[in-house]
Image (cartoon, rainbow, N blue to C red):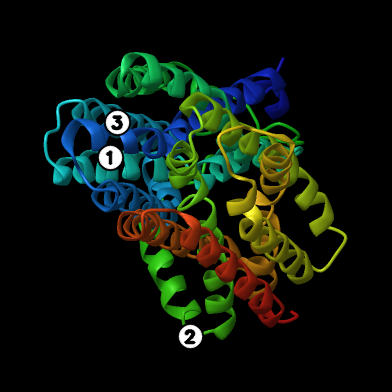
Amino acid sequence: MLTTTHERSPVRPRRAWLIALVAGLVITGAAAFATMPGLLTDPLRTEYRWSRASIGLAASVNMVVYGLVAPFAAAWMDRFGLRRVALVALALIAVGATSTTLMSQPWQFTLYWGLLVGAGTGSLSMTFAATVAQNWFVERRGLVVGTLTGASAFGQMVFLPSLAWMVDHHSWRPAVVTLALTATVLATLAVMVLRDHPADVGLRPYGAPCPVAKPSPRPGAATRTLRVLATSVGDRRFWVLAGTFAMCGATTNGLLWTHFVPAAQDQGMAVTVAATLVSVVGVFSLVGTVLSGWLSDRFDPRWLLVAYYGGRALLLAVLPVVLGPQAGPAMVTFVVLFGLLDVATVPPTILLARRVFGADGAVVFGWVNAVHQVGAGAMAVTGGLLRDVGGGYGPVWLLAATLCAFAALLAPRVGRP
């Protein structure tokens, strides 16, 4: 009896979800590195007498490299496969983190943490999540993308309190080594479980009614990425999107994730308490992202961005008043509300990129996200510099509030389709 094509290519939905689970673990582990500079600031200043600005430079380079690598990561996955890209990225992270424990000069911190860890984590960002969902799922693709994107905030939530405890009780090196070992374990798991496409193991994507052939490697994908950039930079709406998202990065990754812990320590708060508050932001970031995606299907994304940036501006303006040695009700309210707005800007920005730039919207968003990281890196350095010069973080919070207010004014200018 002849075997039908459907019989030769079974669904086996559990395999697709296993792939998504391992991809989520990889993203979760990589995300833990995003908040580590905030925990390292005071220990490195104490041990090496480095300035906050020099430490912030390494965090800035990390964020910029993260953003610049991300648009090309999808092209590399098209050319070499997501498993190889994940393996190389995790290896870069492990080597960079391990080398950090042996450094003695600020430029080494910039090289190891800024360049190597930044390139590794940038390769495992939203483009990695999108590729996994695109290759392995037809149904539930949106759910997978949302969940894997939320895994980044979840990773920060899971690791940050324990890393803070290690730094507080056993110095910073054991915490960094723990992250390096985590990356090594995840690399092993990726080799064992991850596959580039269902066709590699004789399956079809989840929800696909028939087999789907594995696409041929596309060596020209990187060229297309650059071509889309060259075309989109001539459109005013690209700069509005990129500008608002840069201010988003400046006030989240560049400010709260990098400087909140040392700012709280300046006020007499214990590092473990401050780190726990940041982890609460991560918890509610996941909630806010899911809710924002639901709202983006029902309301004009431009006005959602106005509400998000306006709300964030108000919260940052009152932060100097509520930040003190204790995590009282006002402080907890701040972290909950800020968490709800933290990553909520992503779904409306993605939808606007698709609305304006059509089929190139995903690539355009990759470049918009790169500008987001440039804004984050600039604020990481600026925040440390202003703290060194002025002796406090008050002006930094007000600068961030002003940037968010400006982003709220810019958002409606993206325009209708």
Kind of residue indicated by mark 1: Trp
Residue under numbered circle 3: 43
In which quadrant is the C terminus drawn?
Answer: bottom right
Q: Residue 115, position in %: x, y?
A: 26, 46
Residue under numbered circle 1: 113
Q: Foreground residue, 326 or 65?
A: 326
Query: Would you say the residues marked 3 and 2 are in contact, meaning their CB atoms lie under 8 Å apart?
Result: no
Q: Secondary structure at mark 3?
A: helix
Q: Residue at x 42, y 20 (%)?
A: 186
Query: Would you say the residues marked 2 and 1 are in contact, meaning their CB atoms lie under 8 Å apart?
Result: no
- Specify whether 129 is left or right of 367: right
Task: Point out the frontmost of discs 3 and 2.
Answer: 3
For marks 2 and 1 on the same chain, the one whose residue lies earlier in the sequence = 1
For residue 4, which quarter of the picture? top right
Q: Secondary structure at mark 1?
A: helix
Q: Residue at x 29, y 31 (%)?
A: 43
- Specify whether 95 is left or right of 26: left
